[in-house]
Amino acid sequence: MSKKTLIVIGNGMVGHHFLEQFVASPGATEYEILVFGEEKQLAYDRVHLSEYFTGSTHADLAMGTADWYTGQGIKLQLNEPVTALDRDQRIVTTPKGEYGYDELVLATGSFPFVPPIEGREHAHCFVYRTLDDLDAIRASAQEGKSGVVVGGGLLGLEAANALRSLGLQAHVVEFAPRLMPVQLDTDGGALLRHKIEELGVQVHTEKATTDIVEGENARLRMNFSDDSHLETDLIVFSAGIRPQDALARASGLEVGERGGIVVNDQCTTSDPHIHAIGECALWDQRIFGLVAPGYTMARTLASVLNSDRDAAFTGADMSTKLKLLGVDVGSIGDAHGQTPGARNIRFNDEQAGHYRRMVISADGKTLLGAILVGDNSHYDTLLQYALNGIALPDNPETLILPEGQGGAPALGPDALPETASICSCHNVTKGDICGVIDAGCSDLAGVKAETKASTGCGGCTALLKNVVDNELEKRGVAVSKDLCEHFPYSRQDLFHLVKVNGIRTFRTLISQHGKGQGCDICKPVVGSILATCWNEHILATDHVPLQDTNDTFMANMQKNGTYSIVPRIPGGEITPDKLIVLGEVAKEYDLYTKITGGQRVDLFGATLSELPEIWEKLIAAGFETGHAYGKSLRTVKSCVGNTWCRYGVQDSVGMAIILENRYKGLRAPHKVKMAVSGCTRECAEAQSKDFGVIATENGWNLYVCGNGGMRPRHADLFATDLSDEELIRTIDRVVMFYVRTADRLQRTSVWMENLEGGLDYLKKVILEDSLGICAELEEHMNGIADTYQCEWKTAVEDPEKRKRFREFVNLPEQKDPVQQWTTERGQRRPVLESA
Amino acid sequence: MKARTFWNAVCSVEDLVPESGIAVWTEDGPVALFYLPHRLPALFAISHTDPFSGANVLARGITGDLGGEPIVASPLYKQHFNLKTGACLEDDSVTVKTYPVLLDGNRILLETTENQREAVAA
C-alpha cells in the first residue's frame, strides 16, 4: 500500500516540535512527510534570538540538524515559500513545483506588525523576527550611534537589549502609558522603567509616531503627535505580531476578523484535511504568541493525526517569567484583576526595587494572578498556586513578603498535586516525574532525559530539582552529597582536599578528613584522585588496596575470574608485524580473540599468573597497556583521513594518535572516549564520544560530552575551526575541569547536564577563562602527560609487583579448578552454567 | 563427633598485602586471606569462592569496613561479605565459610578440617 503524504508549511519552533512529536508516534509510518520553509535556515530558537548578537550562531540556536530530518525520512525544502493552495485538488504550489497532499499542516507563524507610519519604508527601518532581520540590523548598526525600538512590550525590550549589545544608545518608544502594558500594571511598569533607565536605555511612553523623515544629526528623525521628536540612526519595529494567514485567506479557509486561521479543539481548520498550529492559529478568538501554547497545539495535532479521539487543545496558560535587560519580570494568569470581585495584595519596596502584586478571588481562597518586577524568586510558588487552584494560606500576604519579615517559605514540592504542571514546554506533570522515578530513575539528569522536563525554556530548572530531590528522599534514596559513610564530602571536595593539602595517601586522607577504614566506594575514588594529582604508579604499595580489581591486576576480570587484555593501538593504526604478535600470543595462551568497538583487539581468558608473562611478550613487541581496565582514556577512534580517503580534508589518524598518546593513563571519574573524523561524513562517529573531533577545511571542530552506550547523547559543538595547538589546549582544559569537578562514576555527558549553566557555562570557563583557572588546568595536564609511564612495563620489571599475580601464593603450579572450557566457532570459551 | 582439625601453615608474612587479600590453596579448597593492619585481630580468612558467580575471586576484592565491621566487596558483582562471620550484607541467605587464622612467628596458620602437607598438631 502506498503511503499518504503529509505536508507541513513552515519550519519554525512549533513546526519543528510537531515533527518531533509526530515522527515518534505510530501513525508516522503511514505518511511521507514533506516540509517547506520560507527562510533559508533550519528551524531555530526565536525565544533566544538576541543571543545571536552576543556570540551564538545559527548552529547554537538551531532546533535540529539536517541529519535529523534525513534520519527521520523527512524531506525538508528550505528557502521555498508556498505561494498557492488548491484545496479541491489538494495541491500546494511553490516556485519550484506542485505537490499533492493528503493532510496539510500550517505552521506559518506570524509576522511583525509595522504601524502605518509615513516613512516606515526607510532603509534603516527594521523588524525583529528572523536571523536575516538581525543580520540587517547588525550591518546598519556598524555605522550608527543610536537606535530606537518602537514598542515597549516583551519583544521590544528584548530588541532594545540587542541594540545595546551592538553598542548603540538604545531608546524605547511606547504608545501606552507604561512598559509591557499587557503583563504589568502601573506600579510594575514604573519600576521596570526605572530599572531599565538605570541601565542607560531611554524610555519614552505615551508617544504616537506620526512620521519618519531624514534627520539632521542622525540618519532619521521621528516626529511624535505631541510635537516632540527624536533623532536616531536606525528604527526597529516591535509593535506586536500578526498571524501569517495569507495562504489560508487566499484559499478560502475561515479566518478571524482580525486575522488568524480559525481552528477547533483538534487544531483542524474549516477544511478537515488542513490543520493549523502555533501563532498562525486562532483558537476561541485568541492568538497565542508564546512558544509553550504552540508546543501544546503541536502535541495535540500529533495525537489527532494518530486518530486519538480524546486529543484536544483546551487553551494555555500565558504566564511568563523572564529576565529583560537583566531585570526579573513575571506575570501570572489574571494579572490585571479583571475577574469580578477580585482583590489585590501589593508589596512595593522602592528601595530594593521589588514590586509584587497578588490578585485573589473574592472568597480569598485562590490566587487568580500575579505581577512580579525586580525579583522572580516567588514566581514558581505563585504559579503553582494559580495553576493548580491550591488553597491559599490564611495570611496570603506572607507569600509575597520578604523572608524574615513574616514571609512564608516557598511552597514545598509535597504541597503540589500529582497533576501540577512542572514543565509547561514539554507538558510534564509532577505525576509524570514520580512515574519515571518509580520506574527506576534515580537522579535529576535521568529524569530530564526520560521526561524532557526542563529541556525547553529551562524556566522550571529549580522547581524540577526540588521535586526530584523531594521524591527521591521520600523513597529513601539519599540525595546527600556524601561519598559514603567514611567521608562527609563529595568527590569534588575530596579532590580539593587532596590537592590543596598535598595529601599523597589514602591513610592520611581518611585519618585527617574521614573515619573508619574505607570501602569499595571511597577507596577507588581516592585512588583515582591521587593518580590524577600525583601520577604515581597505581601498584605502589600505598595504592594497591585502593584499586578496583581491574586496576589492581591491570586487566578486565571476566565472569569466571579470568582476565582479558587490551593492548593500546593508538588511533586504531597497527603494523602487520604487531598484528602477528597479537595473533601469536593469543595462540600460545589459547586466548579468545575479538575486535572491540574502539578499534582494538581484546584477548580473553588469561589467568592471573599468565598476565605478566603475556605482557612481557607484548611489551617486547612494542605494545603498551591500553587502560581498558581503568577509569581513564580508552581509545581515540579514527577514520582513515586524507592520507587515503577521497573525501578526507585532514589527517584524522595522525591527530587521533597525538590525542591518544597525550591523554593515555590520565585517571578520571569515569572512562573517557574520543574519536577523530577526517571530514563531515563522520565515519569515526565522533559525536557519540566524550570528546569528538571533526575535520574542517580550516582545522578541527570540537564536540564535547557525547555518549554512546546505555543513555546515548549527541555531543555538543564546542568550538570551531581550531588549529592543532588550539584543539589540544581546549581538550586539556575541558578534560582537567571534568576530572576536577565531576562526581564519582559520572560520565562527561551527565556531568555537563548537571553543571549549573550547562554548555554556556562550560564555554565561558574554558573559552573565556571566566574562572581564571585555564593556565592551571593546562599546567596540570602537561604535568600528567610528562610523567606518563606504561603501568605494565613498570610492573613486569619489578619482582615485588609481580608477586601480586600469583593465583595461589602457596602453590604456584595449582590451576584454578573452577575454570572449565569448551570450544565454540574455533575458539575457547568458558563453560556456562546451565542455570 | 567433631571432625578433626589441623592448623596448617599456608604462607609467610611477606606474602601478605596490607589492606588487601591473597589466595592460598588448601585441601578445603581455595581460601582468601586478608591482612588489615589497622585492626585487631588483623588477619581474616574466608572462602575464596564468590557464592554468586562460583568464581574464585574474593581475595581480589576491595576491603574496608561498613558500620565498623570488616568487609570485602566481591570484585565481580560487588556484594559485601563480613570478614568475621562470612555473612553477605546484601542477601541474608548467603554466607561464605570462614576459617580461624593465626600468626605464628613468620608463618600464617590456617585451621582446616583436613590434613595438609605441613600440618602442625593443634
Image: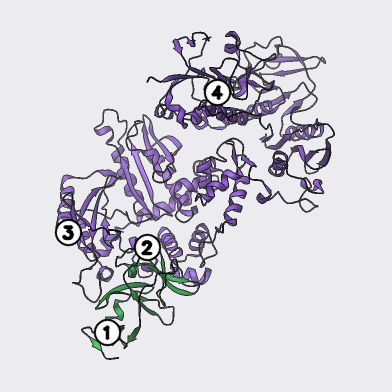
Indicate the amino acid at tag 4: Leu
Distance of label 1 from label 2 (alpha carbons): 30 Å
Nearest to the eye among marks 1 and 3: give it.
Answer: 1
Q: Quadrant of the C terminus of chain A?
A: bottom left
What SS does tag 1 mark? strand
Nearest to the eye among marks 1 and 4: give it.
Answer: 1
Residue A291 image point, x, y percent: 61, 29
User: Seen in the image, is A443 located left or right of residue A663?
Assistant: right
> For mark 1, does the 10 Å Cα neighbourhood hold few (<14), some (14 to 19), or many (20 or more) residues?
many
Which image quadrant for residue A335?
A: top right
Distance of label 3 from label 2 (alpha carbons): 25 Å
Label whose residue precedes the other's in the sequence (3 or 4): 4
Residue B14 image point, x, y percent: 30, 78
Indicate the amino acid at tag 3: Tyr
Q: Chain of mark 1?
A: B
Indicate the amino acid at tag 1: Asn
Q: Which residue is mark 3?
A: A589
Q: Chain of mark 2?
A: A
What SS does tag 2 mark? loop
Q: Chain of mark 3?
A: A
What colour has chain A?
purple
Residue B8, numbered circle: 1
User: Seen in the image, is A385 located left or right of residue A33?
Assistant: right
Question: What chain is the green one?
Answer: B
Q: Which residue is mark 4?
A: A131
